[in-house]
Image (spheres, helix red, strand yellow):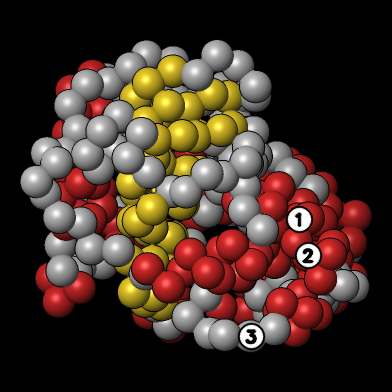
């Protein structure tokens, strides 16, 4: 890892927001004191006022103002002022290697990306544009997935992970179960179950503007009880569901409809030039 310098001026104000689409999430607010975490998506951390500290896989902490962590990489983040912004990008929606090269490939690219992300988080909701245009200046390079795999993923997303099983997804995509599981490993580098479990945990973010009972959220997501649900959520986010619901009171929660997102994804697919490949997840880019 190599440190970046800079960061937003302490005088700048950043709206506390949680913006959720089916393939992107933007969060700006108080970090608190999360435990080590490992999310199932690409994760950008952006300093708002002061640099943050991040350690990967239990390693030595390093100081940065911008970092990119690959899917499922365990890491721990702390800040002196507890303020931070994050952008989460689902791995099935982007060619991770090309994205990392474009956004973080050089010192100049990192500085430009940091400034753009900070500017995007300062914008008022009335000034928002399409997600990638706002936060990255252009659509991120898309991953060209096998069409059957795309159908299975869409089925999982449509049902919020929930109780969707591999047999149901295979039937929906008109493919054998063994072939579908092979495609998850071949093109995404993860198992069907791990992908589905991440989508379950991710769905919690769409419920933060609600005030449900945790057991109801757990059962809706396909967990057998609230304890199992809480353990999985904490492993992904570094917080218990209760802490997340309490902390969400600081945010304005905005969600984008699936139809809007479907139209956006179609544009990415038409404009993207990436070949089908597995995203590289064996090293962090910071």
**Residue 76 is drawn in which quadrant?**
top right
Q: Which residue is mark 3?
A: 212
Q: Is residue 272 left or right of residue 149?
A: left
**Residue 273 is drawn in which quadrant?**
top left
Q: Position of residue 275 (x, y in %)?
A: 49, 41
**Residue occupying image coordinates x 36% and y 34%:** 80
- The answer to whether the residue labelled 1 contacts the one labelled 2, judged by CB atoms less than 8 Å apart, is yes
Whole-Å distance between the Cαs marked 3 and 2?
Answer: 14 Å
Residue 229, numbered circle: 2
Foreground of the two, 150 or 196: 196
Q: Is residue 35 left or right of residue 99?
A: right
How many marks the image carries: the answer is: 3
Question: For the residue carrying disc 2, how many other residues have a C-alpha within 10 Å: few (<14), some (14-19), or many (20+)?
Answer: many
Q: Which residue is mark 1?
A: 232
- 25 over 254 or under it: above or below: above
Element at label 1: helix
Q: Which numbered disc, 3 or 2, marks the residue that appears first in the sequence?
A: 3
Whole-Å distance between the Cαs marked 1 and 2?
Answer: 5 Å
Quarter occupied by the C terminus = top left
Element at label 3: loop
Q: Position of residue 129 (x, y in %)?
A: 20, 68
Question: For the residue carrying disc 1, how many other residues have a C-alpha within 10 Å: few (<14), some (14-19), or many (20+)?
Answer: many
**Residue occupying image coordinates x 52% and y 44%:** 33
Foreground of the two, 263 or 192: 192
């Amino acid at each position: 890892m190599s440190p970046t310098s800079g960061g937003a001026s302490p005088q700048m104000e950043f709206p506390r927001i949680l913006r959720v689409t089916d393939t992107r999430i933007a969060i700006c607010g108080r970090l608190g004191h999360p435990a080590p975490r490992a999310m199932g998506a690409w994760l950008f951390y952006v300093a708002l006022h002061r640099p943050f500290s991040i350690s990967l896989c239990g390693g030595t902490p390093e100081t940065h103002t911008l970092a990119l962590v690959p899917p499922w990489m365990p890491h721990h983040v702390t800040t002196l002022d507890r303020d931070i912004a994050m952008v989460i990008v689902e791995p099935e929606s982007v060619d991770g290697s090309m994205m990392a090269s474009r956004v973080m490939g050089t010192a100049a690219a990192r500085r430009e990306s940091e400034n753009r992300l900070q500017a995007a988080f300062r914008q008022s909701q009335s000034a928002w544009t399409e997600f990638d245009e706002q936060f990255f200046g252009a659509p991120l390079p898309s991953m060209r997935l096998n069409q059957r795999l795309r159908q299975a993923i869409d089925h999982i997303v449509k049902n919020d992970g929930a109780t969707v099983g591999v047999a149901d997804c295979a039937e929906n995509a008109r493919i054998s179960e063994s072939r579908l599981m092979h495609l998850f490993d071949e093109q995404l580098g993860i198992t069907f179950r791990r992908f589905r479990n991440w989508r379950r945990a991710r769905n919690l973010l769409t419920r933060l503007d609600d005030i449900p009972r945790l057991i109801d959220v757990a059962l809706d997501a396909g967990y057998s009880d609230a304890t199992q649900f809480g353990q999985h959520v904490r492993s992904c986010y570094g917080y218990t569901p209760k802490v997340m619901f309490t902390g969400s009171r600081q945010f304005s929660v905005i969600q984008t409809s699936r139809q809007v997102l479907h139209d956006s994804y179609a544009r990415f697919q038409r404009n993207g030039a990436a070949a089908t490949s597995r995203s590289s997840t064996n090293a962090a880019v910071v």
